[in-house]
Structure formats: structure tokens, C-alpha cells
Image: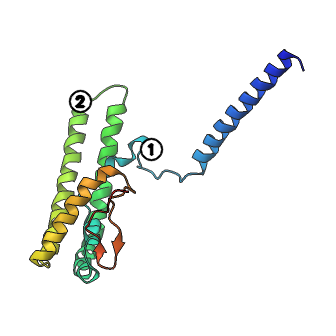
Amino acid sequence: MKKSATWILVLLGLSLSINLFMAGLFVGESLTEPKREGQFKSKKKNLHKVDFSMRRLASFLPAEKRKVFRPFLKENKKSINALIQGHIRSRHEVLNLIEAEILDVNALKIAFEKERAMKVEIDILSHQGFLYLLENLSWDERQALASAITEARINEFRGKRGYFRPKRGKEGREHQPKEKP
């Protein structure tokens, strides 16, 4: 083969590999779950996270104590979900106003106030659940729960499957951090 033919084959191979890579990206994106209406774009998907999760709090408890907390969760499930969905919609509204071509400052102020009010409502209901739960715990159980929550908050920044992530067992989540490998 001549030199020019070799270069042409190398360029064709490179072009083919780039095209296959791009086709793989396109197919992979199309096979993922479709976004629901009101859901954020992928780069903004974590903006709706609520700081306090009652289900997560209950996961730190032994099974018999979780049973005490279930009636409160069942009773307030619809209102909790409605508040969280409202908060997601208000955050989406704020983001849409920020991304708009012309910035409407007054509408943005109103959207921020609405979003803040939704956060406060969620916090109030979360704190009610927390108080309901704490009323049914002994002092030792409250101490263990406080240390577990503190440790979990610190370890949130280590990644979803970090080496300090507590594992779930029969008695709730383990509260002792694992040794670093």
C-alpha cells in the first residue's frame, strides 16, 4: 500500500470510531427513563432535595420503633407529597424565570417568596414528625439517633457508596463508621 492509502484508512477508522461513540451516546440517552412533566433537566436534578427526610430518619430506628412512627407517615403522606411536589414546581418556576431571555425581577421576587414559603411548610411538617418520633424514644435512643444523624450528614459528602456509609441491619442502620480500607 502507498502512504496516502494508509493515511486514508487511518482517517476512515478514526472517523468510524468517533461516529460509533456518538451513536452510542445518542442511543444511551434515548434509552434512559423519559422525564416526567415538571422534572428538572439532568444538570439540575438535585435542586428539589429536601433537607429533612422523615423516612430516612425512621431508617435509623429499630423495627419496633419504626412501627410507632408509621401512623404519622401514613396520616401525612398525601400532604407531604403535595408539599414536595409544590416545592419542585416552585423551584422549576424560579429556574424558568432565571433562564428567560428578559429578566422579570418582580416575577422572580414573587417566585422566590413562593419557593421560600414552600420550604417553610415542608420544614414545619418535618419538625412535627420529628417531635412525634422523639416523644416515643428513650434518652439512650435519642442519643444514638442524634449521633447517627450527625454522622450521616458528615458522610453525605463522601459519596453514595463511600466507605463510611452505614449499612442497614435488623436493628436499623449501624452507627459505627467502618475502618478506612
Q: Nearer the viewer, residue 132 or 21?
A: 21
* Quadrant of image for the N terminus: top right
User: Looking at the image, which residue sits at the far left?
Assistant: 139
Residue 98 against residue 58 in the figure, above or below: above
Query: What percent of the width, then of the height, locates residue 24?
Result: 65, 42
Mark in the foreground, 1 or 2? 1
Tell me the number on the disc at residue 42.
Answer: 1
Query: What percent of the width, then of the height, locates residue 9?
Result: 81, 25
Q: Earlier in the sequence, mark 1 or mark 2?
A: 1
Q: Is residue 65 visible?
A: yes
Q: Nearer the viewer, residue 30 or 162?
A: 162
Query: What percent of the width, then of the height, locates residue 72?
Result: 22, 75
Q: Type of residue at label 1?
A: Ser
Mark 1 → mark 2, Cα distance in angstroms: 26 Å
Q: Is residue 130 left or right of residue 12?
A: left
Residue found at x 18% / y 64%: 147
The quarter of the displayed image where residue 148 is located = bottom left
How packed is label 1: few (under 14 Cα within 10 Å), some, or many (20 or more)?
few
How packed is label 2: few (under 14 Cα within 10 Å), some, or many (20 or more)?
few
User: Looking at the image, which residue sits at the far bottom?
Assistant: 64
Q: Is residue 68 left or right of residue 29?
A: left
Q: Nearer the viewer, residue 164 or 38?
A: 164
Name the residue tied to disc 2. Answer: 105
Q: Type of residue at label 2?
A: Val
The quarter of the displayed image where residue 84 is located = bottom left
Residue 2 against residue 167 in the figure, above or below: above
